[in-house]
Image (spheres, rainbow, N blue to C red):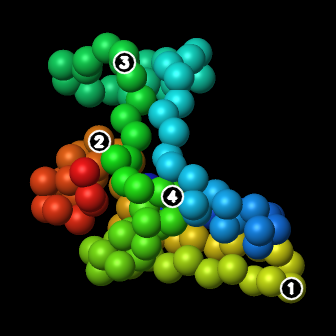
Amino acid sequence: MSELSSLYVIIQIRKERLIQFFNDRPEADPVDNDWLTCWKSRNMYNKPTVTAIPVYPTANNGSLVEELVKNAYFGAKGHYEETGNTYFLMALQFSENYTEILLNEIQSGNIDQ
């Protein structure tokens, strides 16, 4: 059973493509109708206008996953099964609060700037 603060991902992907993804830098998404619809559905006080989607300032996607798994708070683990070309990633204490996590990790020095 998944809680609102947990993250569980299963991806069918060839190992070569997963390695390429881990070596690529995170990219910012454009602010589009999907993001705006999602943002409008959230209830909060003093909700700012969405002008940009934050992106993790890290060297590559692999280091982002490594930091997530290395930080004991998240209770995270990643695993690749070659027999099914399947990558599993789970974080028990992830969060809906993306921006707060990002700022906390940067301020604590867990993410290289």
- Image coordinates of residue 42 in percent, x first then y, are 39, 28
Q: Earlier in the sequence, mark 2 or mark 1?
A: 1
- Image coordinates of residue 50 in percent, x first then y, are 37, 18
**Tag 3 and tag 4, C-beta contact below 8 Å:** no
Residue drawn 23% across and 65% down? 110
The residue lying toward the viewer, choosing from 75 and 66, is 66
User: Residue 99 — which label?
Assistant: 2
**Circle 3 SS class:** loop
Q: Amino acid at mark 1?
A: Thr
Crowd class of label 3 (few under 14; some 14 to 19; many from 20; radius 10 Å): few
Q: CA distance from mark 3 to mark 4?
A: 24 Å
Residue picked out by circle 3: 50
Front position among marks 2 and 1: 1
Residue drawn 37% across and 54% down? 58
Q: Amino acid at mark 3?
A: Val
Q: CA distance from mark 3 to mark 2?
A: 12 Å
Residue picked out by circle 4: 61
Q: Earlier in the sequence, mark 1 or mark 4?
A: 4
Q: CA distance from mark 1 to mark 4?
A: 23 Å
